[in-house]
Image: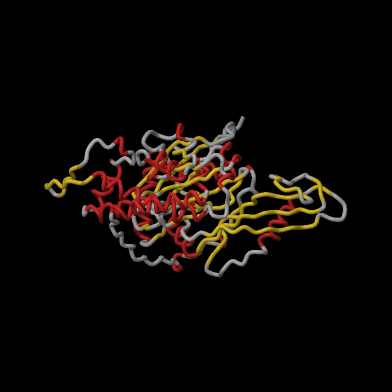
Amino acid sequence: MVYREPEILVGLDLGTTKTAVVVAERDENLRDPQIIGIGQAPSQGIRKGMIINLEQAVDSVRAAVADAESMVGFDINQATIAFSGIDATSITSRGMISLGRTPRQVTIQDVERVIEAAQSELAVPPNRCTLHTIPVKYSIDGNSGIDDPLGMTGIRLEIELQTVIVPSSVVQNVINCVERAGIRVNGLVVKSLSSAMGSLTNEETLAGAISLSLGGGTTSIALFVDGRPVKLSVIPIGGDHITNDLAYVLKIPISKAEELKKQLSLDSDEIEYEDLEIDLRGKQKKVDVSEAVEVIKYRLEELFAEYVSHQLSDFSVHMFPAGLVISGGVAKTRALEPFISDLLGFPVRIADPLDSFQMPPGRNDCQYNSAAGIIRYITHKERNPYRYMETPLNMLRTGPSSVVVSPRKPKKEFVKPKKESVKNFVSAIKRSIKELF
């Protein structure tokens, strides 16, 4: 018997707050890969999911890869990359082909033709590119809801296709950043999809669920119905906005605001103190805990009422009986689950990675769902090449000379609301949520 070296799969999650690398191993006797190591490093040169300083971002990738290499004991030179995909657009198109005058079985060539027919309905601007092409459902002779048409018989094949389009400059920057760090890019996946892969169970995707990843600079959303994603999007708001709000309102440094954010709970019953002291260069500053919690709630209410609800506006809440599944660093906020559930009147679950039992302690919580989800995305794509299709990398890759660094956007100033206006705002939010659902 010939011994074969285990196959190594690597995922690299390029985030605003941290860069994570997950390494998995699969031998010929195992159907599913096993995670054997995770590296991570603070992200530099990335804001709201976009690279704004290429060299700093490259250093972050190198540091995360080196950390993973120290854990697994071998060099890493290739990876599949997850990134925020800011300004990603999820578009639905439909296509139809004839199978002939008499019924016959559907072949792979027929599936390719109907996908091409649906793609021909799209008009992709020259400064944007197609990242994912995802069949949502097929129909044969008007009978819809077919998951896999291969081998089935009919005379007319139709498809509903979900296409994810992103700015070309964002994709090119990601590829150039990772390759400058000495890592070959095997594939790309938008973070809303990798987070969903790492968070949602098969039962949840089949029943219908919403995956929401609350990261440092962005919030990624994936809507699943009948086991397929029907919408993927990214909102440029995340945990860093809460930190900035706290720093502005409480007049404390960003670093202290970040520490404070991690200590607070959204449940007033858990608050056993009215004031909290923060050390500022040897001087103690008192912080009104109730005011700090109010700032966090205000930002979260704004996120869900104005942005998340907008992403759901084309769908009925009854399409998602499995509810809302939240991951990402902000999901570690104490009492977040009941707070969001009460706000939306919707079942909510905070999710650790589905493969958390394989991951090392301290690197197996909801911050690492996207990284772990990359491995699941790779294996799903291998088993069914027509489930998640990507544009070939040679059509996306550009040389180092064509690196485009996205311009910095001016920071939106946070204006401290008066307590009365906060109450009115919250009431308006609750009314709009009820109307939405």
The residue sitting at the right extreme is 102
Percent across and percent down for residue 431 are 45, 51
Residue 398 picture location, percent across and down: 50, 64
User: Can residue 188 be seen in this snapshot?
Assistant: no
Can residue 90 be seen by looking at this rendering?
yes
Q: Residue at x 59, y 31 (%)?
A: 29
Camera-side residue: 188 or 228?
Answer: 228
Taking the view exactly as shown, the residue that stands out farthest to the left is: 282
Name the residue at the top extreme: 1
What residue appears at the point 36 percent right and 61 percent down from the top-left corner? 53
Nearest the eye: 194 or 91: 91
Q: Is residue 99 left or right of residue 431?
A: right
State the image coordinates of residue 258 (x, y, percent, origin top left): 28, 48
- In the picture shown, does residue 173 fall above or below 319? below
The image position of residue 24, as x and y in percent, is: 49, 39
- Nearer the observer, 139 or 429: 429
Quadrant where the N terminus is found in the figure: top right
Residue that extends furthest to the bottom in the rendered view of this protein: 126
Say which residue appears at 72% left-offset and 48% top-offset: 144
Question: How is the model colour-coded?
Answer: secondary structure
Q: What residue is drawn where x is 46% and y is 62%?
A: 170
Q: How many marks?
A: 0
In the image, 57 versus 408, the foreground residue is: 408
